Image (tube, rainbow, N blue to C red):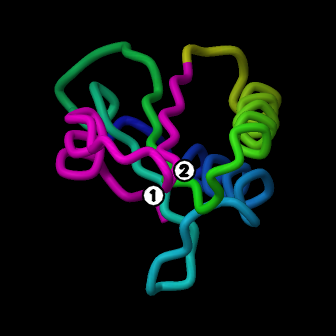
Amino acid sequence: MRLSEQQCSIIREAAAENFGATANVWLSGCLAVWLFGSRVDDAARGGDIDLYIEAATDNADEVIEAKLGFLVALYKKLGEQKIDVMIRRPGFKENLPIYQVAKQTGVKLS
């Protein structure tokens, strides 16, 4: 994985601050955030930070507000870089292949 422990910690904290009330909490009691894509591959170079989060709310306004706050926090703490955040709402019935890829090939950061 091509993120430092400090970067992972920043991502976890920003996710908890912004999605805490609207994110899926798993059995561990922690917010689940996955890193997927090229940053998971230690042999790759460059690449954006691809993150996957499952929201607990179906309210689009709440999800958008949380996503924007999350990105602002990441840019402030990690610096300006390409960050993609994929959020799945519970009411979205389609199980898109990208959701499966993110969870199967990704690394759970929390």
Residue 3 sits above or below residue 81 on the image:
below
Residue under label 1, please give it: 109
* Left or right: 34 as drawn, with respect to 70: left
User: At 49% from the left edge and 56% from the top edge, which residue is drawn?
Assistant: 90
Which residue type carries mark 2? Cys
Q: Is residue 97 above or below residue 28?
A: above
Q: Magenta stretch?
A: 83-110
Say if the magenta span includes residue 99: yes
Residue name at image x 49 percent, y 65 percent: 110
Which comes sooner in the sequence, label 2 or label 1?
2
Q: Is residue 29 above or below residue 40?
A: below
Please give the residue where the numbered disc 2 appears in the rendered image. Answer: 8
Could you tell me which quadrant the N terminus lies in?
A: top left
Res. 41 image quadrant: top left
Crowd tier of the residue under label 2, counting other residues whose Cα lies within 10 Å: few below 14, some 14–19, many 20 or above: some
Query: Splitting the image into 4 quarters, where does residue 39 fall?
Result: top left
What residue lies at 69% left-to-right and 60% top-to-bottom?
A: 22
Q: Position of residue 105 (x, y in %)?
A: 19, 45
Amino acid bearing label 1: Leu
Q: Are marks 2 and 1 in contact (CB under 8 Å)?
A: yes
In-front residue for pair 94/46: 94
- Residue 21, magenta (yes or no): no
Look at discs 2 and 1 and give the one toward the viewer.
1
